[in-house]
Amino acid sequence: MDAVREFSATLLAAISLTNLRSLGIALFLAVLIGAGVIIYYFYTKSLRSEHSNPGNKGRTSSRRNFLVGVLVLALAGFLAQILVPLLELLRKGTVLVGGISSGQEAPPKIANVAEVPPDSQVSFVMRRNPDGSPGQHPAILIHLPEDKAASAGKEFVAYSAVCTHLGCIVSYRSEEEVLFCPCHAGRFDPTDGKAISGPPKKPLPKVRLRIDENGDIYAEGWV
Amino acid sequence: MQRAGSEESCLRKFARWLIERAGASEFTKTIIPRHALHPMYSLGGLASLMFFLLALTGIVQLAFYTPAFGEGNIAYESVRHFTESVPYGFVVRGIHSYAATLMILLSMLHFLRVYFTGAYARPRELTYVVGIAAGLLSITSAFLGYSLRMDHISVEAIRIGQFLVLQLPGGSWLYSLVFGSGSFDDVIPRFLALHVGVAGLLGLVLLLHFYMIHAHHISPPYDDSDPEPAIPFYPNFLLTELAAAVVVVGALVTFSAAFPPELGFKFVFGEELPVGQPEWYLMALYALIKTGIDPVLAGFVIPSMGLLIFVIMPWVDPLYSRHPMNRRIATTYGLIFVGEYVMLFLYGQLTPGEQIPLINALLLAIAVAIVMGYVGVKLTSRPVPPRRQKRPSEGNPSYAVRALLKNVWWIAGLLLALALVLGGLGAVSHLSGSYYDAAMLFGGSIILMGWALFAAKVGLVDAKYLA
């Protein structure tokens, strides 16, 4: 029931955000297309090939020429209104260029010890996937709260941030002291990365950390 | 041809020469039966129009898209740049995005029309199977396409795609074949190549589909009555199609300008983003995966089983009659499938970022199967006899038709004049550089041009078929 209420709330929010002009345009389009389908439907009801319409003979050729003119002009107008914007786009459009780097660098510094208070997290990127192939693998560094740190025997731990269920990104939830996956409510133990509840079965791969004398934390690789 | 040779204008002569030499004279002899003029029969044609629009707008976007991730998600930035800074970029991307959604929606409705009216009956079984293949290819291409935006929705889609491929037998071998190393720098160019490649393959499959329709002709009425000839394909029906296409293009231009296409949050490593939900056509599949059953079962086995039954239905369905109420197996299965699909879609849509308890899904699925199965069996309990043909009434045309034919010339002229006014205003906006207004006005003008085209066609070529 909650989900239904939330859904209707978002729907209402979406409608109130849409300004009146957009709503008007949507209505205009719906009426034009809807009316078109209805008119066309009834129109086809009176089409018969076995029956030649006698009312056809009285038409003058000037009206015929007029209709040919409308036909040709409408087609030409259509093509012009497609071509003018297209040519403008191709003539004036520019391609975005930016710095593209190959991403080959030394093991990345994640953070300094002083920047990560207990019971908090920092996201970073591993240059290799847990299976050793090159890639950009999201990972997460956690400063464990005191009780967890005591049981784990270390203060800082880091894991792959990719949920072992469907590959969403997990994050640390301090109120529950778990790693939480928002997609399907999977929970992992922050001390060893093992799955606690929810759909994931496999543990999160661990990252080997090195903390130098200045307190800088580096991701050395996968355990 | 309505007129004798001596009265032919040189334009008409040229058209006839062109058609004959192009080997298309068969089309001039094709008569469209009346039942095929029903809007229900235009769904497939409209889906093809969407494919054509997708090809055109896709080619333009190829020139502006940067298939690289690099340091700061260049692909996303290039899409944003195209949408915001390139003149009319929002229209081109808008048409591409909306036409893709519409193509899948129209294909699904077209499939339902074909399935429930038994249009797959001998000799059109393979046309139907090729059509299903085309539908699957368009969903694949759409998935690859919306992954290229590289916003939070795309990243979610790519991750789930990678995960599902890894679960397959021989998954890691297949994984590196499709995704390379799996980093976004490798995935984006591959997805672009696959997106275009799959779309090209779809084009070929569609050509085969059209050829088969042409070879076997359009299916007779589903109520087993004799088809009643209505209007020739050339030029009457062709002009109807053209007018409809112009109206639809105009509507898409206006719509894209009024509601610029969706672009989610930029994906950057290390930043927390909302969980992206898949596009609506993949939502049922996603809901199935969310129940937590084996992903190979949910992502591949169950959907392919469901589809496979559709594929073999032409050979399973006894087809004593094509009326849906006379085909118990096909109608009941179709209703159950549609019910389950809609149920899963709604369940997935209502539970973003949540797991679906398997027991709930299972109970709901059984309930839907029972209800839809009951409806199907009930609907097919009494056979419907073939419909007796109604003879067209002879005599003078009705008052409405006479009024229409008498007034159609000024209606067409008025529509064209209105279109020209809107187009002129659009041109002024265009020259002053306000592209959003220009696109909106051009779109409105194009819609009216389509209607003017239709009105002119009614007066010019349809008059003698109106009763």
Image (cartoon, rainbow, N blue to C red):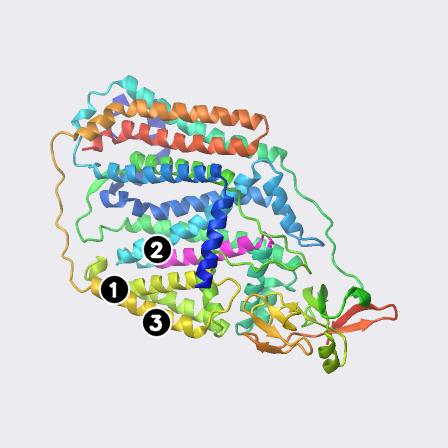
**Sequence-wise first label, 2 or 1:** 2
Say which quadrant the C terminus of chain B sits in. top left
* Camera-nearest residue between A27 and B130: A27
The residue wearing badge 3 is: B366
**What's the residue type where badge 3 is placed?**
Ile
What range is drawn magenta here? B129-151
Other-residue count near label 1 (Cα within 10 Å), few / some / many at <14 / 14–19 / ≥20: many
Marker count (numbered): 3
Q: Secondary structure at mark 2?
A: helix
The residue wearing badge 1 is: B376
The chain under label 3 reads: B
Percent across and percent down for residue A103 are 74, 59
**What's the residue type where badge 1 is placed?**
Gly
Q: CA distance from mark 1 to mark 3?
A: 15 Å
* Camera-nearest residue between B12 and B326: B326
Residues at marks 1 and 3 on the same chain: yes
**What's the residue type where badge 2 is placed?**
Phe
